[in-house]
Amino acid sequence: MRLPPLIRTKPEAPNVHAAPLWSLRPQSDREAGDAVVSNFMLHWFPAKISKASMAWNYSFWLGTISAALFFLLILSGLPLLFLYVPSVERAYQSVKDIEFVITFGSWIRAVHRISAHLMVIVVALHLMRVFLTGAYKNGVGRGQQREINWVIGVVMFLTTLFLSFTGYLLPWDQLAFWAVTVGTNIASSIPAIGPEVRELLIGGRNIDQPTLIRFYVLHVVFLPGLLGVLFAYHMWRVRKDGGLARADAQTVVESPRTTDVVPTKTYTLLGVARGTSPSVTARTLEAPNTTVNAVPDLTRRALIATLGTIAVVSIMSVFIASPLEEPANALITPNPAKAPWYFLWLQEIVTDTTIRIGSFTLNGAFVGGVILPGVLVGLMTFWPWLDRSSHLTAGVWMPRERRRQNIVFLLLILAVLILTFIGMVLRGPYWNFYWPWEAWPDIPGRI
Amino acid sequence: MEKRTSSPYPRVDRLLLAIVGVVLVIGTGLFMWSDRAHDWRFYQSEFRQLVAEKFGDDKAAELPEGVRQIWAAELSRADRCITCHQAISYKGFEQAEQPYRTHPVEPLKLHAVEDYGCTSCHGGQGWAIDTAAAHGEVAHWEEPLLSRTLGEEYTLAGNKNALMQMNCNTCHRYDRETKGAEAINLAKRLINEKGCRACHVVNGFGGTIGPDLTNVGEKAPEQYDMSRLSGQRTAFAWHMAHFKDPRALTEGTVMPNFNFSTEQAQALSMLMLSWRRQEVPALFVSGTPRTDPRSAEELKVEEAMKTGPGGWFVQTGCFVCHSISALGVRSPAQIGPDLSNAVEDVQSRFGVTIDTFLANPTGTMSVVLSRQIILTPEQKQVAIQKLREAFAEYQRQRGTPGTVISK
């Protein structure tokens, strides 16, 4: 039997896109449409974007930077996957090898570590920006569900923290071991089920091989996968909700306008969305003087933010060495034993709410480690439904109407920052308080 | 087609993008440079020059390049010291400055460097390839290089190199005397002379008034009370001061002041720090029996056989298969016939005299005498002589009058 020759023939049906690549300089509307359908970036971005949304000083591009950092983490994590051995006998050695003899090893590890720390910071800043601009609020568009995206965002923030926390254990040095000890001990203070929660977290009653492999799998497979999926959904929702909340505000401020009505277009993914897409009055959004083409103006800025992030992290990684302490030792507690820095405000609250009366100790871990963060995360998650301010405040920095909640929010952030600073800088051996100008008692050596 | 809207962005943003691009290139250059900028490259080129000057360019060209390591698999040590210390096994640099000095041969004869690596004796951080990190003079590394410099810092009274002996004692812990480890030997003698076990448990027995010292070297520096210690604040310094005057460091202690000399206190401190819970593969532990243990009875019999009339058969190895009962030699295996009457037995079994048989053995003995017990003609004469003696003894014991068998 003769097989038919493997020749790719042009499809004969009319109107089927035959071109394998999109055109960078479309000569017709048809070619432009093809480009949108077959190009991921154009798929992802709208055809046009309001100039207001493009501004550096509205969003500070924190979401883009977070995504860039996530990308950088995946990129730097891949070589580490080949080099790191998730076993208590060999993890520490393998990190030493990465640090000392792998070509570019210490730089790759520094990129991974610095990106992780920066990602926690930038994601938190992104969340703060969204809160302060009320960007979780629906504006004037139909079918908007920005509160859902806010909740997704909160989950992504928590996932980022957990990703960082699981990565913290992997070098299997004293820093890792005791930070995770402190972190998981806080979880065990939940009444009734605390010890079980801790056991579930660390896969036993001691931090050992089961903990390491558990954290490892969470760190390299489960959590990045989850974050990736959430990220895709997060971005899709941004499109579905009509872009940044500021675009809505812009519409409200500027309409009604006298420009001619331009027929609304619905592209691609938006076609399957409920309702008629983010049609925030076609009148202003598509008016020539308030919008620019996403390509190349938006893509160029996205490129600047992404490459800029990579450049900054790359240079930082040359000069900031990643710490690697002594091998993990369950018998020797470093003094002081500190949680990862983003949990230090909790550790500080735990010590401050621990009350000792004589020999009786009321452990603050439940209040500081469970109740308080639980309430804060709960409030944060449901805030869009608790915030009763007008839709006109969506996408506006510090509007008068939301002044009070913004001030309370900022005060909470300030409190967290102060507590974190105290925990990071001012707490010395035995968790004693030391001013920056006071020297800690020097730690003796062996020989 | 729709007109493209005019955009105010390209002018500034293109410049920004260009700047970001330049910064990226600079960043890439930086990290490539930082990966190359290591001292070992300098030391390797320097050593290459030294070899070229001394032994010519051909020898210099043979020197290996790049990061090198000794992988002591059984001890899980990857020691990269030889990346800079290239002269370690290179004869001719015995008097050179470090890192270009040849290692003394003597200690390496018993401690092959492929088995032990460098750091198991010298200390330091074998993984590292930069001087400070490799010599352990960095934070978070508690095994510094046990060098002469460190010994001088502690103003050791005796041999300034003695600190290294602490690591000898990791494997030689159960030796009474270890050749070359004088300080440790001195300390071990003191432990017995001063009766430390009256109050302290060491290796499983002793009194319980003081703390168990079996693994005292394992105690973390943070766990010492250094509040009354002046000068260097290390576990080693603490032990030295404590041996000199226990009450000055620990209030209310009942440990007496033994008036140790500085050298004694230092030796004892080294011994203390060397007593650690370190896993050493059994093959590395000094004094571990390499044969199956034998009872006193068995040893006595063996000794008697060796020194008795049949001693020659034991030393030559015949007794592995053959007993020579007439001479009191009893083979543990008894695979072959008793050699007491070999003189007549060979004749009846093979139809040749013992002389002919030994000169031209057949069967199993041809294999044994050609591969395992290889005898010179002179030794064969001795064997025949000994076999005759055994036969004479055999006949004497049997009480048969001498029927001399002719040759």
Image (spheres, coloured by chain):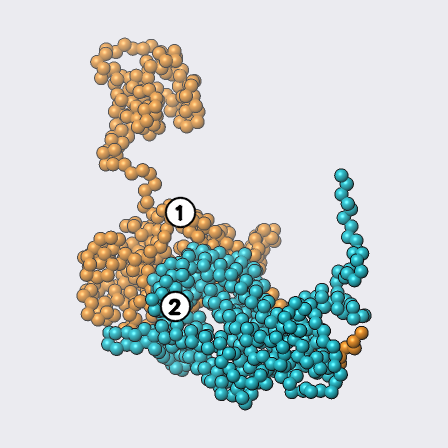
Look at the numbered disc 1 and give the secondary structure of its residue: helix
Q: Where is residue A94 in the image (x, y as percent from the top left)?
A: 48, 58
Q: Where is residue A292 in the image (x, y as percent from the top left)?
A: 71, 79
Q: Residue at (80%, 56%) from the top-left corner?
A: A12
Q: Among all residues in the image, which is located at the extreme front?
A: A275
User: Left or right: where does residue A100 sit relative to residue A251?
Assistant: left
Residue assigned mark 2: A187
Classify 10 Å Cα crowding around label 2: few (below 14), some (14-19), many (20 and above). Answer: many
**Amino acid type shown at disc 2:** Ala
Q: In the image shown, does B268 or A253 lie closer to the viewer?
A: A253
Name above or below for residue A270 compared with residue B75. Answer: below
Name above or below for residue A296 compared with residue A414. Answer: above
Residue assigned mark 1: B110
Total number of numbered labels?
2
**Amino acid type shown at disc 1:** Leu
Quadrant showing the C terminus of chain A: bottom left
The hue of chain B in the figure is orange
Name above or below for residue B103 compared with residue A265. Answer: above
User: Left or right: where does residue A332 sit relative to residue A246?
Assistant: left
Q: To which chain does the residue with label 2 belong? A: A
Q: In the image shown, does A193 or B103 lie closer to the viewer?
A: A193
Quadrant showing the N terminus of chain A: top right
The hue of chain A in the figure is cyan
Q: Position of residue B163 (x, y in %)?
A: 36, 60
Q: To which chain does the residue with label 1 belong? A: B
Disc 2 and disc 1 on one polypeptide chain: no
Q: Residue at (26%, 77%) from the top-left corner?
A: A357
Estimate the spatial distance between the alpha carbons at disc 2 and disc 1, rounded to whole Å.
54 Å
Look at the numbered disc 2 and give the secondary structure of its residue: helix
Q: Residue at (39%, 72%) from the top-left corner?
A: A370
